[in-house]
Image (tube, rainbow, N blue to C red):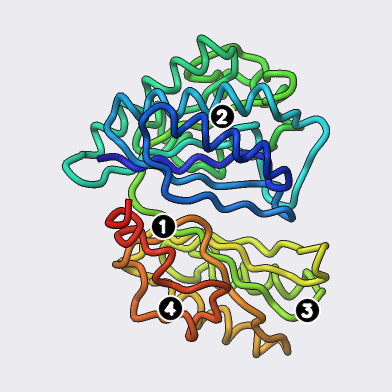
Amino acid sequence: MIECIPNVSEGRDRPTLDRFVEAVAVTGCRVLDLHDDPDHYRSVLTFVGEEDALFDGALALAREATGSIDLRARRGVHPRMGAVDVIPFVPLRGATMEDCVRLARRVGRAIGEELRIPVFLYGAAASSDARRNLAEVRRGQFEGLAAKLARPEWIPDFGPSRPHPTAGAVAVGARGFLVAFNVVLKTADLTIGRRIARAIREADGGLKGVKALGLPLAGRRLVQVSMNLTDVGSTSLLAAYERVEREATALGASVVESEIVGLVPRAALGGATTEALRLDRELEDVVLENRLAAR
């Protein structure tokens, strides 16, 4: 069993998102979760299956999203470069990282050849060290793709060397567990969110395995610290939350709530509870193992 967690650049049109889910489900994959976010203009699907079913499911989603999303007309607060922005594969029961790398390359080649979309391989599937980090692959976003693709070092792994006019490009990769975790602050001051993000992310000397951004939630007049936890053995959900809360208190802000985007493996909790995280829904509802058992 392998897990696929694609991110699509649509977070406001529920009928469109329902079509995406149906396109995946009819291939035989088991859809475990859909998380949509209007401020990010982004949604995250989680589905599982064997290799061939996931190949069909990922390609079906890419077809549907390419026909439905025009990036020239939409932009949220989250960085993005494609209609389907990223398609990661994660090994679960009986699967290896090598299986996921092989699958990522199959899917990337099919998207490039059939849909004529530039494809970058990243993570464990990357064709070079410069492409392992998703943030580097996505740097410049949709608007900067044409200039990026014109540089020799950014020739795509598959597909044309020019952006798709409406769907941009896509990153397809293989990786271990990653937890997307957001903490909402009771402030409209984006400077506070950005200072906290800088204090906690590993690249600036903060918590190991933490990537973070401070983002505005314009619809709520609040600020969010948006995190990816890439090494949950070193930094758990609870540890990340408590550090954000301490930094916010020191800056005169407080936490409104937190949210987990998609699902989280139980090993990442670090003793967390719904109450301790001020989570916007029951923690047990978003534990990966629970969803797998239920489906």
Amino acid type of the residue that numbered disc 1 sits on in the rendered structure: Thr
Q: Earlier in the sequence, mark 2 or mark 3?
A: 2
Q: Which residue does the numbered mark 4 point to in the structure image?
A: 239
What's the residue at 50%, 24% (across, down)? 60
Name the mark on residue 230.
1
Q: CA distance from mark 1 to mark 3?
A: 27 Å
Q: CA distance from mark 2 to mark 3?
A: 34 Å
Name the mark on residue 187.
3
Amino acid type of the residue that numbered disc 2 sits on in the rendered structure: Val
Amino acid type of the residue that numbered disc 4 sits on in the rendered structure: Ala
**Residue 126 image-quadrant placement:** top left
Whether residues under marks 2 and 3 lie with C-beta atoms below 8 angstroms apart, the answer is no
Q: Which residue does the numbered mark 2 point to in the structure image?
A: 170
The one nearer the camera, 252 or 44, is: 44
Q: Residue furthest left?
A: 94
Q: Earlier in the sequence, mark 4 or mark 1?
A: 1
